Amino acid sequence: MNVFPGLTPRPDSLGQVSTTHLCNLKTEIMQNESRLESYPLSKGILDLIFSLLCSYMPKNLGADHRKPGIQPYVTFVVDEIFFKFYDRQYKNSTEKWEIGWKCLKIVNYIIQKYEPKVNDFVEQEDESPPLGYYIMLQLQKKSHLLNLILLIIDDACQHLDEYERFNEREVLEECSLLSLTIIEEGLIKQTEFLNLHITANSPGILFGLNKMLLDVNPRSQRPDHLLNITKFVMYCSWLPKHSLAAVNILNMVSRMPNISSQILDVFISNGHIYDEIRQGFVDCLDMETNSITNTTRWTSNNFHSSYKIHIKIKTVIIDLLRNCILQPYPNIGLYLLGFEYANDAGEKQKLNITDATNHCLRALTALLDFHLETMKISNAYDADLEQIIKSSYFLLYLFCSNTRTSEGMLRYLRSSNDFVCRHLKELPFKNMHYSNILYQTSYLLECTAIELKLASSYCQISRVQQICEILVGTATNKTEDQRSINSTLFFSHSSPLLMEHFIKSKAENIPNFLLSNILDWLMFESSDVNNPKWDFFDISLSKQIFDECESSTDEGLLLINLPKLHKILHDELCNVQGTVVSGQRKLILQEIESILMYALKINEMRNKNRGTIKLVDAWAQVTEILFIQVFESTLPYSIKQELLFEILQKLLNKAVSIPSALEVTILISEAVFILIVCLRQCFSQKPNDPGKLDRFTKISIYIKIKCFLYDDDA
């Protein structure tokens, strides 16, 4: 079988190639179509090649007189059509970009389907490497293919920057999207490809696509390839797919060591474009992402797709900002967040946030505020949106915990209508049984602990009082009797005997004790997922596949990679042959869906267990700082001891009654010991008060009984 005989001529009986075969498609394109400045044949060839690639392709194509495969035809498309389309003359300028779009479609399809393997780098006589191997090879070094793709992106930027309508605009936008997608996919597969290249000891030097994007642009004589790519963020309102690919590329390139500062220098050296780019990132974060369940307008598939793209853009931007925190200053992430830019800043110099309003930190706090208000009127849960909210809280915590940025970040949060206190007052968040909500609460409490610690260290009494009023539900400007908390509530779960001996009844109003209430929301027991029964898949082998698909998250948690698992199961189904399997294909597909749902439940279970551990740890940090660092004038010992009584009683009751995970048990034990020391300190302030000392002795006995029961259950 030979699709285009003229492209791969068959030798005659003497081994000679007839010259009559050379008057083929190549000649037709070069002589006739170029002369007429119209290319219908080229477009037809491109459509045919793309259709052949997308359909079933026989492995022995052309095997009778050459290496089998479709490679000669794709090589013809790339060398004779794609490489020359840019410099040819056209009657209709739109046709130029139509040909470029069809060529890029073929290249993009090939690289999307390609998976690097070691055998690709070993030359074989009877078989050619996959087409994707040649595309990846050209992307990892200086090549005409890479230069042409970057030239298309450059052209698209120049036309789109004018914000004017032109005939070929839509086709040019599609060309630029495919170019961005090809570069994005090349970066995704770069590490694996280069590692296999080294392992196979292949000849040739590959620099890597990420480094090639930082090379000098021949057109502008400046290293602005990455700048041209990032410009597409500015068009997020009508080109969201372009913005997503651009942010992904910037994120992957900025991960290189000591490269983020170089990227920022390139941006700043190109006039005021860096402010427009930062505004583009802000616009991406400000894009509306209301939950699908909250709105009726998402019934259309187009709206649903747009929503998913907006969610992905926000996720990648937050990931970019988080990765830059460990990069040397100055870097692109700190600049986007609004931190001051100074080349002469020392390594230990504190960083402040500028007064400009168009930075990503303002957009992030606005996003969290909007989500907080939405939760008040709706109980809907959107996993994708909650994941973004979780990442946003985590990003704020990272900058609050960083020594260089903590003071500037906390100062900005206080100026944003007291961000931390406003969100702290809304605890508990709705849907606390989901892992994302547990993580959100833990990061908010960790930010609170940092601010409380710094405020106490700098003797900011009014700020400490404000936070204490939220955490313990007391107003420090009231009298001691008014601030006293009802002790009968502390031991509401205790036995009548302990109530009679240890508790003195009081009649004061009960305030909202946030630190104590958090313990009521928490579920300490470890959740698990029941093993299902499958007819076609072996459970033991499925667990082995789960282990192979596990990957570590940023929090160090092992989760099952669902896309990888789906691909393995789908390949397994394709490898199984026979009429019996074909008759039961629908049942097998249903079972594959069941396996994926089971893996999803395992991921949620692991996330929930880790989220509980994080929340207990964050709660312990806030509690310990509150009782150790806060001044006596802000939190008197009389109130402190009553608060400690309630927390210890509730903590021990919950720890004894519910079997907890080992990590939770360790955190609870540490908290109990520290709180006991704080309680002992409260009583030691007035050693001449025999009533209080007697009560402390009885409380100690009670705690020992609880600890004994806890050890016995363990």
Image (spheres, rainbow, N blue to C red):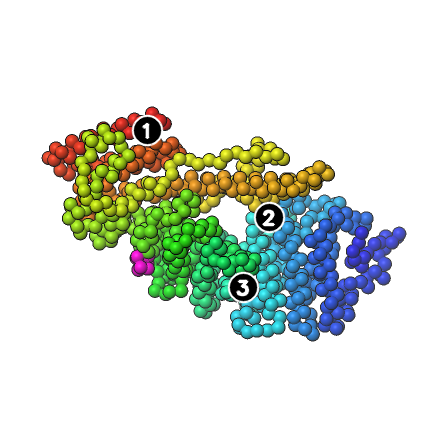
Q: Nearer the viewer, mark 1 or mark 2?
A: 1
Please provide percent x and percent y for residue 584.
67, 39
* C-beta proximity under 8 Å, tags 3 and 1: no
User: Which residue sits at x=79%, y=48%?
Assistant: 63
Residue nearest the viewer, comparing 122 with 55 = 55
Mark 3 / mark 2, whichever is N-terminal = 2
Q: Which residue is mark 2?
A: 193
Quadrant where the image shows the C terminus:
top left
Residue 239 numbered tag: 3
The secondary structure that dominates the magenta segment is helix
Q: Which residue is mark 1?
A: 710
User: Which residue sits at x=46%, y=39%?
Assistant: 605
User: Which residue sits at x=79%, y=51%?
Assistant: 62
Residue nearest the viewer, comparing 569 with 405 = 569
Please provide percent x and percent y for residue 469.
24, 50
* C-beta proximity under 8 Å, tags 3 and 2: no
Mark 3 / mark 1, whichever is N-terminal = 3
On screen, residue 521 versus residue 259, left or right, reads: left
Question: Magenta segment, which residues?
Answer: 411-418
Query: Hey, what amino acid is under mark 1?
Result: Tyr
The crowding category of the residue bearing disc 2, from other C-alpha atoms within 10 Å (few below 14, some 14 to 19, many at least 20), is many
Q: Is residue 113 visible?
A: yes
- Disc 3 element: loop
Q: CA distance from mark 3 to mark 2?
A: 30 Å
Q: What is the residue that sits farthest to the top in this orientation? A: 712
